[in-house]
Image (cartoon, rainbow, N blue to C red):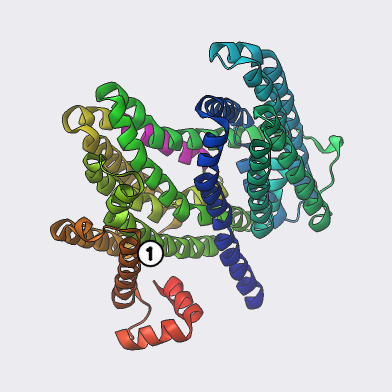
């Protein structure tokens, strides 16, 4: 039994690490591919490419979050050994996504000319919308298999396929632009990449999950309703998060100016990438929570929640510490001067999303144990309240007020109301959780932010070399603080350092288990 549990824990760690592969590949592809496409296509054709991709991206709303529902119900029924219901979940999801795919094709082939005329994109844009619609329809099928693979714990395989798709897409697009094939051919690259992903995911399910049988007779009206009910809550959560991150642009654009929108957008880009780096590994424990819920193993659920929260607290503090301390210098080296008025907002958002990172395990926990509706209510409350408070504060304090409104809402809704609800579910003390998980990262971030402001650290970083050196030095200081104040046991600083460097896995295991 112990070895089995150890194997599961090891699998979770590897899966969590693999979640960074798609993030890294998409980030690097975006950094290198975007200037090439703009240079080879020209600004107007590239604008058509981005616009068509954005329009097609809204098709994702038609899926109604059913992928998240698969992640909940499949491991739940697996834990009970109910193969029949597991098959009903998968086949019902495929049936629903087949309807979505047909709807996407219908919309793409009836609205293409109207959309192209509205945006004055010409025949190329109309054809591109049709082809991209086909790519989105194909994507529906492999997203079901993607969710199945992840629900069964094969995150490394799924992330590998997504990473390969990103690289193939980049190579295909580069080939098209250097060969002069144009926008429509770039759309067919998307079709080919999605077909390849569908093939790989289908082979993966067939190879590793022979118990999953694709039969129309396994489509269940009851499971269909369950998927839609659960999925709609997931969709509300996703839309609320989008509103939280992007809705402030509308406020700033209305109250302040379009120039301020650009300035704030740069800060949001940094925050969004930092957030995704911390939050992404938490998704691997979603199906584990569902599996444990099916077994009604409350003690393991509580233990998993605590372990994930300590990792989030330590990683989140490090990520946002680097962002707050080095973000202004990075922006200056990257884009030049002119963004100084957004730096206070960067500090405020850093603190706000530190709370978000520490509590990043909450969506996976709530979704896994079937509390998705409750999570959706908190997410909608947070988004609506955040926009209202940010609007009022923007009137008085500009961009800084916008960020302050988000911080206050995150602390009130996520850090107080939602967290108190979670603590009641888990049977733990709210004050104890705050002391053990929030006190150290918030204290570190406050201490270093004040020191950075008083020492005017930006004036010492005038090159990329200086930035890298400052990052390494900051990381070293942070690790020292973790060893001294958050490390496991009562060992001395020197002995803790020795253990960390001689047996890092043992040190990290003790840190997570006893932190």
Residue interval drawn in magenta = 372-387
When the figure is inspected, residue 322 is found, relative to residue 177, above or below; the finding is below
Q: Tell me which residue sits at (40%, 62%) in the image.
A: 315
The overriding secondary structure of the stretch rendered in magenta is: helix
Q: Tell me which residue sits at (40%, 33%) in the image.
A: 246
In terms of secondary structure, where does tag 1 sit? Answer: helix
When the figure is inspected, residue 354 is found, relative to residue 170, above or below; the finding is below
Compare residues 88 and 268 and report the one nearer the observer. Answer: 268
Kindly tell me whether residue 429 is visible in this rendering.
no
Split into 4 quadrants, where in the image is the C terminus?
bottom left
Q: In this view, does 277 lie to the left or right of 137?
A: left
Percent x, y of residue 128:
66, 24
Q: Residues within 10 Å of mark 1 (few under 14, many from 20)?
A: many
Q: Tell me which residue sits at (21%, 40%) in the image.
A: 341
Compare residues 231 and 139 and report the one nearer the observer. Answer: 139
User: Furthest-left residue in view?
Assistant: 454
In the picture of the structure, the residue carrying the numbered disc 1 is: 314
Q: Tell me which residue sits at (22%, 28%) in the image.
A: 392
Compare residues 112 and 378 and report the one nearer the observer. Answer: 112
- The answer to which quarter of the image holds residue 410 is top left
When the figure is inspected, residue 379 is found, relative to residue 321, above or below; the finding is above
């Amino acid at each position: 039994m112990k070895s089995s549990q150890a194997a599961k824990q090891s699998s979770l760690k590897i899966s969590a690490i693999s979640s960074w592969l798609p993030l890294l590949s998409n980030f690097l592809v975006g950094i290198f591919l975007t200037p090439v496409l703009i240079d080879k296509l020209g600004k107007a054709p590239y604008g058509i490419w981005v616009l068509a991709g954005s329009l097609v991206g809204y098709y994702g709303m038609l899926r109604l979050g059913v992928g998240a529902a698969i992640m909940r119900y499949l491991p739940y029924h697996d834990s009970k050994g109910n193969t029949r219901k597991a098959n009903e979940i998968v086949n019902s999801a495929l049936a629903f996504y087949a309807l979505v795919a047909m709807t996407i094709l219908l919309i793409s082939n009836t609205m293409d000319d109207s959309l192209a005329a509205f945006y004055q994109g010409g025949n190329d844009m109309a054809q591109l919308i049709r082809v991209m619609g086909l790519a989105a329809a194909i994507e529906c099928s492999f997203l079901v298999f993607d969710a199945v693979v992840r629900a069964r714990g094969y995150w490394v395989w799924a992330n590998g396929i997504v990473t390969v798709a990103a690289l193939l897409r980049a190579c295909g697009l580069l080939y098209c632009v250097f060969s002069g094939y144009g926008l429509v051919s770039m759309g067919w690259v998307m079709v080919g990449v999605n077909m390849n992903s569908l093939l790989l995911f289908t082979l993966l399910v067939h190879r590793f999950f022979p118990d999953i049988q694709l039969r129309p007779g396994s489509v269940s009206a009851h499971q269909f309703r369950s998927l839609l009910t659960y999925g709609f809550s997931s969709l509300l959560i996703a839309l609320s998060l989008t509103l939280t991150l992007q809705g402030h642009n509308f406020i700033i654009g209305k109250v302040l100016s379009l120039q301020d929108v650009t300035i704030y957008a740069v800060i949001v880009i940094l925050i969004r990438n930092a957030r995704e780096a911390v939050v992404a590994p938490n998704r691997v424990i979603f199906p584990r929570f569902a599996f444990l819920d099916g077994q009604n193993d409350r003690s393991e659920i509580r233990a998993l929640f605590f372990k994930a929260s300590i990792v989030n607290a330590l990683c989140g503090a490090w990520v946002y510490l680097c962002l707050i301390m080095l973000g202004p210098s990075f922006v200056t080296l990257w884009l030049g001067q002119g963004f100084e008025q957004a730096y206070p907002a960067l500090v405020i958002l850093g603190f706000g999303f530190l709370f978000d990172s520490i509590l990043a395990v909450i969506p996976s926990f709530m979704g896994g144990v079937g509390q998705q509706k409750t999570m959706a209510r908190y997410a909608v409350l947070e988004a609506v309240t955040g926009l209202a408070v940010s609007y009022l504060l923007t009137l008085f304090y500009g961009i800084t007020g916008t960020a302050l409104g988000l911080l206050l809402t995150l602390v009130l809704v996520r850090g107080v109301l939602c967290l108190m609800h979670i603590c009641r579910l888990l049977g733990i003390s709210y004050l104890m959780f705050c002391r053990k998980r929030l006190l150290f990262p918030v204290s570190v971030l406050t201490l270093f932010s004040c020191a950075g402001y008083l020492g005017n650290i930006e004036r010492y970083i005038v090159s990329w070399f200086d930035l890298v050196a400052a990052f390494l030095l900051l990381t070293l200081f942070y690790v020292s603080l973790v060893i001294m104040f958050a490390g496991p046991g009562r060992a001395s600083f020197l002995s803790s350092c020795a253990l960390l460097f001689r047996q890092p896995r043992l040190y990290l295991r003790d840190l997570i288990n006893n932190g």
